[in-house]
């Protein structure tokens, strides 16, 4: 079987994690080998960088550089090997999150992010390198005010979760821009629905693409 790379995006509180776990079980029930991972993170080095990005004060450029460094290690050691073995890779966030959070939320230069994206995600050793992107990106689109209500009091927030609603509105706008640039790659899900309705939409999006029975 060919490898399948699915990323899950959305602002904090959108409900990605529950559906990632359910989807992993669904693919396994159909005989697929599944790797569930996350960004920043997924390798020992990338998890160390994740802790720094989420908790240490730094400017937007430093954040972006650390996130892409973590992504490079993640691609080399986890994502690319799993795809080469025909596995399904379910990743909680990928590069769209960098454009949404560091680009949209923090206002970092999108052109420079695009340069980093091509450098980090292009397969080396080929005359015409192919930039690795998810086969589909499931975007859990949720209004910032609803996300804030869901997160209220649930846990101690990291430095991104502690941002005001205006920040998350800019993040959502960043996701929207990425979807408009690559509409065929995105499956936009209304995350304000009930959990059951959201799950139904996730299944429908993947069934429509022929990846689930």
Image (cartoon, rainbow, N blue to C red):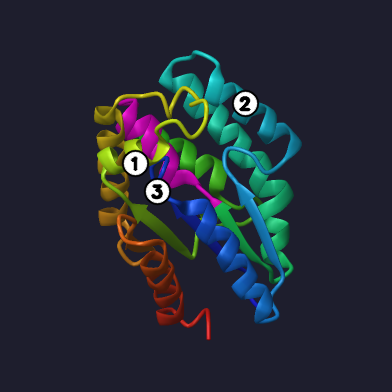
3 and 1 marks in contact (CB < 8 Å):
yes
Query: From what the image shows, is residue 81 above or below residue 168?
Result: below
Query: From what the image shows, is residue 213 above or below residue 17?
Result: below
Q: Nearer the viewer, residue 177 or 212?
A: 212
Q: Main secondary structure of the magenta part?
A: helix
Label annotation for residue 14 = 3
Q: Residue at the location (72% across, 70% down)? A: 33
Q: Nearer the viewer, mark 3 or mark 2?
A: 3
Q: Which residue is mark 1?
A: 147
Instruction: Compute the Cα span from label 1 to label 2.
Output: 22 Å
Q: Residue at the location (53% across, 40% down)? A: 119
| Direction top: furthest residue | 57
Query: Is residue 141 something that shows in the picture?
Result: yes
The span picked out in magenta is 92-108
Instruction: Compute the Cα span from label 3 to label 1.
Output: 6 Å
Q: Nearer the viewer, residue 91 or 180?
A: 91
Is residue 96 within the magenta segment? yes
Q: Nearer the viewer, mark 1 or mark 2?
A: 1
The image quarter in which residue 174 lies: top left
Label annotation for residue 116 = none
Is residue 179 within the magenta segment? no
> The N terminus lies in which quarter of the figure?
bottom right
| Horizontal side of residue 81 vs 194, given as left or right | right
Q: Which residue is mark 2?
A: 51
1 and 2 marks in contact (CB < 8 Å):
no
Q: Nearer the viewer, residue 119 or 10?
A: 10
Query: Is residue 132 something that shows in the picture?
Result: no
Q: Residues within 10 Å of mark 1 (few under 14, many from 20)?
A: many
């Amino acid at each position: 079987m060919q490898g399948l790379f699915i990323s899950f995006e959305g602002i904090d509180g959108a409900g990605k994690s529950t559906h990632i776990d359910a989807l992993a079980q669904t693919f396994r029930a159909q005989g697929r080998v599944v790797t569930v991972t996350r960004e920043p993170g997924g390798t020992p080095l990338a998890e160390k960088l994740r802790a720094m990005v989420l908790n240490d004060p730094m400017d937007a450029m430093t954040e972006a550089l650390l996130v892409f460094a973590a992504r490079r290690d993640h691609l080399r050691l986890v994502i690319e090997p799993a795809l080469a073995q025909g596995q399904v890779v379910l990743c909680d966030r990928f590069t769209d999150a960098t454009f949404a959070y560091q680009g949209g939320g923090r206002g970092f230069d999108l052109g420079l992010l695009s340069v980093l994206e091509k450098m980090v995600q292009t397969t080396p050793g080929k005359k015409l390198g192919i930039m690795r992107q998810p086969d589909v990106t499931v975007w859990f689109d949720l209004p910032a005010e609803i996300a804030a209500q869901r997160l209220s009091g649930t846990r101690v927030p990291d430095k991104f979760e502690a941002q005001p609603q205006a920040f998350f509105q800019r993040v959502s706008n960043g996701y929207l821009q990425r979807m408009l640039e690559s509409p065929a790659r995105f499956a936009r899900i209304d995350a304000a629905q009930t959990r059951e309705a959201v799950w139904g939409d996730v299944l429908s999006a993947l069934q429509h693409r022929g990846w689930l029975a």
